[in-house]
Image: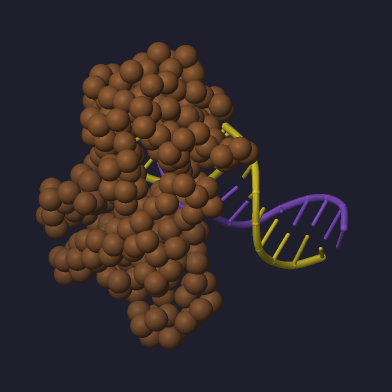
Chain colours: A brown, B yellow, C purple
Amino acid sequence: MPEAPEVEAVARALRPLVEGRTIRSARVLHSAGVRPQTSATIARNVRGQRIENVSRRGKYLLLDLASGVLVAHFKFDGQLLFFDDAPPRGTHVDVLLKLDRGTLGFVDQRHLGTMTWHLNADAVPALRKLGVDVMSREFTSAAFAKRIGESKKPIKPLLMEQSRIAGIGNIYSSEILWHAQIDPRRRGDRLAVDDWRRLHNAVVKVIQRAVECCSNPPPNFRDTEWWFTGLDKLLRVYQREGEPCRRCGNAIRRIQQDGRSSYFCVHCQT
DNA sequence: CGCACATCCTGTGTGC
DNA sequence: TGCACACAGGATGTGC
């Protein structure tokens, strides 16, 4: 679920299941899931709390409680589960929230993702550091250029910096640059006005389409094997090294930037 | 401040 | 088949 569109799709699908429900109790089955907090902290603070609202900030999912907030980050593989009763035998879950109707689970077999409790969202450093949300109305072309346009860094890792624009990850940054026909190695401060216009358009378009793809079919919280299959028809370059560019036919290249893979077409991205 | 790198974890795919 | 190693849709902290 890692990037903003996936988390947004999760928030939308989760809303009708948990909004207005009350958390009867919390059980932490794997302490890594609540790191650096303890299971006692979670249990004490969420017991009896009503889930008022489900929202998203960047790649973070927030469950606003009557008092406090549960903040989930899925990192690579984290996911939410929902069962009408208890989870089926053998289901691996890291954090279990027993609701007055149903059970909400958080699981990440790699144990990189976390779900933590805080007094309020402003008390969470990671959330305070987030830049303008990629899906908000504040994400204008001007705001975009201002956030990135003076940096000497390559544009691909810049797009992924959550403190500038919140919500774009490794997949969509490559996809966005392919659509805008911009080389991922171009420096932020070397982009022209016309590049900014194309790039902003590409960000909005790719993210919008991704939300639609991530919601069709919608997340299935009952199936631990479920993932976002709707994305297949959207991706143009990601993980297509060596395959022909969908625009010009030249081979897609993969390079490393900040230790992450970037995919692009050398011929039509300049 | 920017940058390169290690770290938190574990599973899967690939090449020898 | 066994084994080593690269790699994975992320964020943070360290040292230079």
Please state the total of marks drawn on the protein image.
0
Q: From the image, which quarter does the C terminus of chain A lie in?
A: bottom left
Which residue: 36% across, 52% down?
A6
Q: Is residue A39 left or right of residue A100?
A: right
Front residue (pair A224, A39): A224
Q: Is residue A148 left or right of residue A221?
A: left
Residue farthest to the bottom, as pictured: A249
Which residue: 61% across, 37% down?
A89
Front residue (pair A108, A123): A108
Front residue (pair A146, A119): A119
Residue A146 x %, y %: 16, 50
Q: Is residue A124 visible?
A: no
Which residue: 40% across, 34% down?
A102
Residue A245 x %, y %: 42, 80
Which residue: 36% across, 56% down?
A218
Q: Is residue A201 above or below residue A168?
A: below
Residue A28 x %, y %: 51, 24
Q: Is residue A17 visible?
A: yes
Residue A110 sits in which quadrant?
Answer: top right
